[in-house]
Structures are given as C-alpha cells and as structure tokens.
Amino acid sequence: MEYLKSNRKKETKCRIREDIYTLLEEFSQKTGKSMNLIINEILEKFLKSDFKKENVDFFFSENPKKVFDNNGVTIFQNDFLKVDLRNYINKIDLVVTSPPYNLSIEYGIFNDNLDYDEYLKFTELWLKKLFLLLKEDGRVCLNIPLDKNKNGQRPVYADIVKIALDIGFKYQSTIVWNEQNISRRTAWGSWLSASAPYVIAPVEMIVLLYKNSWKKKRKGTSTITKKEFIEWTNGVWTFSGESKKKVGHPAPFPIELPRRCIRLFSYKEDLVLDPFLGSGTTAIASFLEGRKIIGVEINPEYVELAIKRLKETVALPLKF
Ligand SMILES: C[S@@+](CC[C@H](N)C(=O)[O-])C[C@H]1O[C@@H](n2cnc3c(N)ncnc32)[C@H](O)[C@@H]1O
C-alpha cells in the first residue's frame, strides 16, 4: 500500500512543477485534504469562472430584435441569455435590474416556477453574461429577495451573492429596501405558539457588485444633491413598492429604486443596462436622469407596455 502511495506521489510530482507540488503538499497537510481533492477544487473554480467557447456562442446566439431606439433609449425584445449583444462587451457602466424571483409569478411566456437548482443555474448564466458586458469599473445594483418561502425556505440572497462571487464579481455592500409591505406580516405560521411560527422580513435587498474596480476610472458629471447623498448612503432605503395594477405588470419596482441607483452610482451620459426590463421602469428613470439605457425584455406584451409608459412619461419625439 505504502509503495503504491509513493508511486502515485511520484507520478503526480513529475506532471507538476516542484514548487507548486511543495505548496500543494503543505496545503494538504494543513487542511487534511488529499492533493487530488485540492487540485479538483482548484480546477472546478477555474472552470466555473472561465467562459468556455460554447458558453460564449450560446450567449450571443439570438439575433437582436431592436424594437425601440430613441434619444439614448434602446429596447430589445429578446431572451437576455441569448441575444447577440457583442457590441456591448465591456461597455456597460451600470446595471440596474430585478430578475425573475421564481415565485410562480404569471409573466406570460416565461416560466417563473423553476426547480430551485434550475433557478440558480439560470441565475448563474445571466450573471456570467452581465460580467462579460460590464466595463472594468462597471457596477451592478441587483434587486433580489432576501429569502423565499414558497415550496420550502431558501436563502435566495445568500445563494445569488455566492454565485456572483464565484463568477468573479466583487462585492461592495447591500442596501436593504424597506418596502413597508404590511401584507407580508400576516403569515404568522403557528399563531401564538412555538410550534412553527414564521419570521418574515418585509424587505428586499439591493446588492451592489462590481467587476474589477469600485472607483470609477474616468471623471464625469454627478447629478446627486448633497441631501440625497447623505440620505442614500445610509443603506436602509424606505419607500413603498409599486402597484402592479396601476402599472399593468406583475412585479414592477417603483421608479424611486432605479432613480436612486442611477444618481448615486453613475455619471451623466453613462450607459445603463436592464436585462429584465419588464414594464420599462429603469428605461424611464435613465432617460429622465440623462443616462443612456439598453433594456432587454423577453415578453412582447411587456415590451409594448414599456414603450407605452416611456411615451407617456417622457413624451419622447418618437421615430420608428
Ligand atoms: C421582476 S420583472 C422586472 C420588472 C421591472 N423592474 C419593472 O419595473 O417593470 C422580471 C422581468 O424579466 C422578464 N424576463 C424573464 N426572463 C427573461 C429573459 N430570459 N430575458 C429577458 N427578460 C426576461 C419577465 O418577463 C419580467 O418582465
């Protein structure tokens, strides 16, 4: 047995450099993990963050269907995972978005009721694509739930942040959006009993991530006031959610959310992206704040709604 072990050691040793072998050996002794296991872990990490050619082909496999292009607002009716946005690689300054929450929301053609592992796989794919499109100092404001309690408790926020970090995103901080949604306070579980009470936080999260450098590389014009800066750099934001009925979309965020993110984290004329545009809230906020915006939405009904809201809100001189 000892003989076999030492032979295997020799084999491994002659395939890798002496100094790396010594490091691996030390690490193995320290952690109690076998050298093979350590090598596998390193490879797995490397492969996860490596954009393999098949991935890149998949990410750009669908022709872009540009349905709106006016005054710096560009909307594509496409699947964000597949739309060919090669022109925008390393071009995006800021992403503001709220992805599908997988809460069985009726989005029409999109299935919002994936098995949780599938949902995380989907999340990994779109985050990888965002990573490709972001500038080196590009930032992401990701509005996601803290947790999920349909079909079992899940720490959605923690899982998504972990996926993003594995891809290579860097973590800045998290804003807690206090939505003051009282209806969520009525699911008590076992009322007045320790049997199985439910604890639910009536908040959503806005995770702040970036690609490589949090400090912006170029100088630009900020549009935030002193009062806003002082108020919004306090990471608990309190304002109400948006009415689904009023907007005509099952999960819109209020314009206050992208407005604050855009003012706080981007310069005038920066390029913003919302890969899950929905009813177009980020596009409206970007236009009003003097930023350029690309929005992608898979559902033609919501694309129509986004364009209608844009026309109504900002009275764009339209050219098709
Ligand atoms: C949470 S909603 C976004 C709502 C948006 N923030 C608003 O204010 O209206 C998510 C949106 O993503 C869209 N969607 C789902 N999968 C998509 C995909 N693969 N590509 C593009 N859009 C997608 C859904 O149709 C839905 O409108």
Image (cartoon, grey):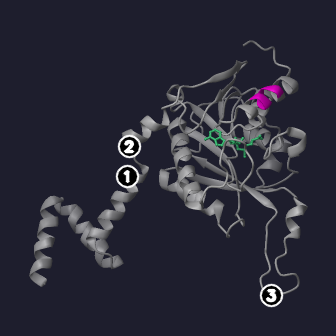
Residue 27 shows up from this direction: yes
Give the mark, 3 or 1, whose residue is nearer the N terminus.
1
Q: Could you tell me which secondary element the residue under label 2 belongs to?
A: loop
- In this picture, which residue range is highlighted in magenta? 304-308
Q: Quadrant of the C terminus?
A: top right
State left or right for residue 134 relative to residue 302.
Answer: left
From the image, tell me which residue sits under label 1. Answer: 47
Counting from the top left corner in percent of width and height, residue 298 is at 65, 36
Is 306 within the magenta?
yes
For the point 88% across and 84% down, the residue is 192
Counting from the top left corner in percent of width and height, residue 130 is at 55, 41
Residue extending farthest to the top is 319
Q: Nearer the viewer, mark 3 or mark 1?
A: 3
Mark 1 belongs to which amino acid? Leu
Counting from the top left corner in percent of width and height, residue 235 is at 76, 55
Give the mark, 3 or 2, whose residue is nearer the N terminus.
2
Q: Quadrant of the N terminus?
A: bottom left
Asked if marks 2 and 1 touch (Cβ < 8 Å), the reply is: yes
From the image, tell me which residue sits under label 2. Answer: 52
Q: Could you tell me which secondary element the residue under label 1 belongs to?
A: helix
From the image, tell me which residue sits under label 3. Answer: 194
Q: Residues within 10 Å of mark 2 (few under 14, many from 20)?
A: few
Q: Residues within 10 Å of mark 1 (few under 14, many from 20)?
A: few
Mark 3 belongs to which amino acid? Ala
Quarter-of-image position of residue 103 = bottom right
For the point 55% across and 60% down, the residue is 117
| Nearest to the observer: residue 46 or residue 174 | 46
Q: CA distance from mark 2 to mark 1?
A: 8 Å
Is 221 within the magenta?
no
State left or right for residue 14 relative to residue 73.
Answer: left
Q: Residues within 10 Å of mark 3 (few under 14, many from 20)?
A: few
